[in-house]
Amino acid sequence: MYIHDKPVFLKGDVEYNISIGLRIRSVEEPLIRDRCRAVMEELGIEGISAKNAYSLSAGRAHLVSIARGFVLDPEIIFLDEPFTYLDSEKRSLLAKALQRRRALGRGWLWYHMIWRWLGLLGLIGL
């Protein structure tokens, strides 16, 4: 999964935007709510779940984009500038979340020029 540093949101609130990948996969509603809430708490954004996604600051929008990826529990996540726009508290929460995923056998890679890395890995043609 690739998480870009400039997220694109759908019309709706934060929780809906985080849940969209699960909805596309026809996950049942109670599980969608549970997984979204768990990821929002992990990243410290549970207090903005009902806010309009278009009204968020850059830092909050970035965390919502990361949460949208985390909620799907992918085996590997490519993060483009994951700590951009985040204050020290949110950077710490994100670092701990990444450590938890690593302990669960999930991989992640971040880089400010992710496309170069993907090309070096042979995953895209440059």
Image (cartoon, grey):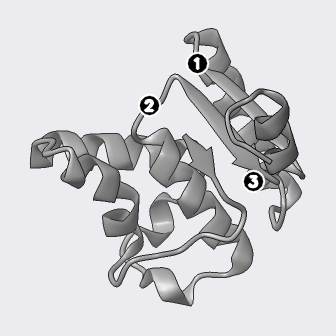
Q: Which mark is residue 90?
A: 3
Rendered image quadrant of residue 19: bottom left
Disc 3 residue crowd, few under 14, some 14–19, many 20+, Cα 10 Å: some
Tell me if residue 110 comes above or below residue 84 in the rendering. Answer: above
Residue name at image x 58 percent, y 18 percent: 106
Residue that label 1 marks: 106
Is 118 or 63 nearer to us in this picture? 118
Contact? badges 1 and 2 (CB < 8 Å): yes
Residue 91: image location, x then y, percent: 81, 49
What's under tag 1, amino acid-wise? Arg
> Which marked residue is nearer to the observer: mark 3 or mark 2?
2
Q: CA distance from mark 3 to mark 2?
A: 20 Å
| Residue for point 56% across, 60% down | 65
Is 110 situated left or right of 107 in this image? right
Q: Amino acid at mark 2?
A: Asp
Label 3 and label 1: CA atoms lie apart by 21 Å
Towards the viewer: 4 or 50: 4
Classify mark 2: helix, strand or loop: loop
Label 1, label 2: how far apart the Cα atoms are: 8 Å
* Pointer 1 or 2: first along the chain: 2
Badge 2: residue crowd in 10 Å (few <14, some 14–19, many ≥20): some
